[in-house]
Image (cartoon, rainbow, N blue to C red):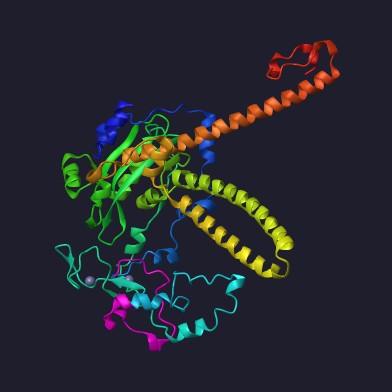
Amino acid sequence: MASRQQSSHMAQPMGKAAMGRQVAEPIAASEEYMKYLTNLIPSTTELIKAGFVVTPLTKKELQTKVKCKKCNKKCTKTDRPPRDPSHAGDGSSNGSFANETTSTASNAGSSHTGHKRRHRSHGKPHDKGKQGDATSTNSKQEQPRIICKYHPGRIKNKTWTCCSLHVSQPPCSGAPTHTPLTYAPGALEARWLFVPTPPHPSSNPQAPQFRSAVAIDCEMGTSADLESELIRLSLIDYFSGQILIDSLVRPLVPMQHMNTRYSGVTRQDIQNAVRNGTCILGGLEEARREVWKFVGPETVVVGHSVRNDLVCLRWIHTRCVDSLLVEEGVRKEVKRREEVEWEEKMDGEISRMLVMAATKHGKNKSEFLDDEEEKINKKEEEEKKKRERRSREGMSLKALAEKKLGRVIQDGGKKGHDSVEDAVAARDLIHHHILGLMQNDKEEREEKARKEAEEKAKEAADDGPETWGAPPMNYCVSHFPAGWGI
Ligand SMILES: [Zn+2]
Ligand SMILES: [Zn+2]
């Protein structure tokens, strides 16, 4: 529709003027539809598994937010001293960081390898005896693994002052451990304070009506402490397709950059909006209050990777439908079916091979079997990789919108994303999925009814007076003559 067309060319938020503007086709709300929608809400266990925050952070969880002041990454548990103190030392002091990374590649499995997984030594029967004492050789060469990789210098004219390399170049220095930033007392707690959706203020008759479902999308910049910081907030009504909120948000923390390439928001945009009074001035707290005008504890919140939007708002809301998780579920099911098919095919292959071995190869049977097994294993490995590659590709909102909705979004080039357009796309993906489920269920119901009717017709034909003959195959139960006894 025309308004959708307009919105895709307009990355800038409309502020309060946009409220109520229709940006998507309305969807007829019904109890049945809500049942389908709420069925897509993951369980709390599934939410936690997918990285949603469902309770305020514990002290231990807060600790995982501490950043390294050298590399700006999180100081996770990889920050452990090397096992053997004789190997300890600052990786930067050897002056050859590039060599260090290559030498440590063969080093996986030492005590401080952290989250990097040990290279798999495939336990195939053919490998037996070949591994020998490789492990002991490795341990002799063991060197401190570089956990913290960074440029010690600053960026000047798009170049690192430490190594004169372009900003895009990988770090020139490293250290075996991270160096945690120091936070003022209570600062980390305040920064990561998550707040649950408050209940409806029923005492206030002026309180606006909560929506049964909304779609959300946030644009984020990067704060000085290198966290994602909310800078634009868009909320639409799931059913009416109208804009509820589309506003820039003034961050209340120092910002490093606005991520303009993706967010489509510049510092100047925010300054202008502040001047014009079209901006949410009170940072996250006010942004949440704006959302809660429309969203109560029962409201279903839809989004693509909606976890990120919730985290960015420091908001706990468990009635969520995530178009990414829904799509992942669909792909998992497809993959499972493909695997079953593959297994069946391979079973056939193995029987064929055994027959061949028994008939043709006489004495060399076991060698032949070994060869064949290796071929099958290889094929299986390739097939598995293929399936995994396919399940990973095209999960971005842009790719899914194009594939499932035939819609090109995030096409603004340097203008960045439009969070209204993205919220609409996530909502339409979910709607598309629900229509599919409804259609499936309808077909299943019809098939069941058809079978039942066929069954009954058969019974009736067996019992009934012969002169009536067989009922037509496509009759409807309600058209049954009274004499059929149903
Ligand atoms: Zn450097
Ligand atoms: Zn670090």
- Residue 59: percent from left, percent from top: 43, 65
Quadrant position of the N terminus in the picture = top left
Q: Which residues are magenta?
A: 71-99
Q: Main secondary structure of the magenta part?
A: loop
- Residue 2: percent from left, percent from top: 30, 26
Instruction: Choose between 200 and 306: the one closer to the eye.
Output: 306
Instruction: Choose between 29 and 380: the one closer to the eye.
Output: 380
- Residue 402: percent from left, percent from top: 38, 39
Picture residue at 84% right of the left edge, 16% below the top: 464
Picture residue at 43% right of the left edge, 41% below the top: 302
Q: Is residue 157 left or right of residue 226?
A: left
Q: Is residue 326 left or right of residue 254?
A: right
The number of discs equals 0
Q: Is residue 7 left or right of residue 454?
A: left
Instruction: Choose between 244 and 343: the one closer to the eye.
Output: 343
Quadrant position of the C terminus in the picture = top right
Hey, which quadrant is residue 16 in on the image?
top left
Rendered view: 452 above or below 338: above
Hey, which quadrant is residue 158 in on the image?
bottom left
Within the displayed image, which quadrant is ligand 1 positioned in? bottom left
Instruction: Choose between 258 and 290: the one closer to the eye.
Output: 258
Residue 73 lies within the magenta run: yes
Rendered view: 294 above or below 314: above
Q: Is residue 10 left or right of residue 393?
A: left
- Residue 66: percent from left, percent from top: 35, 67
Residue 141 lies within the magenta run: no
Q: Can residue 370 be seen?
A: yes
Extreme residue toward the left, this view: 157
Q: Can residue 202 be seen?
A: no
Rendered view: 66 above or below 350: below
Picture residue at 31% right of the left edge, 81% below the top: 90
Picture residue at 67% right of the left edge, 59% below the top: 353
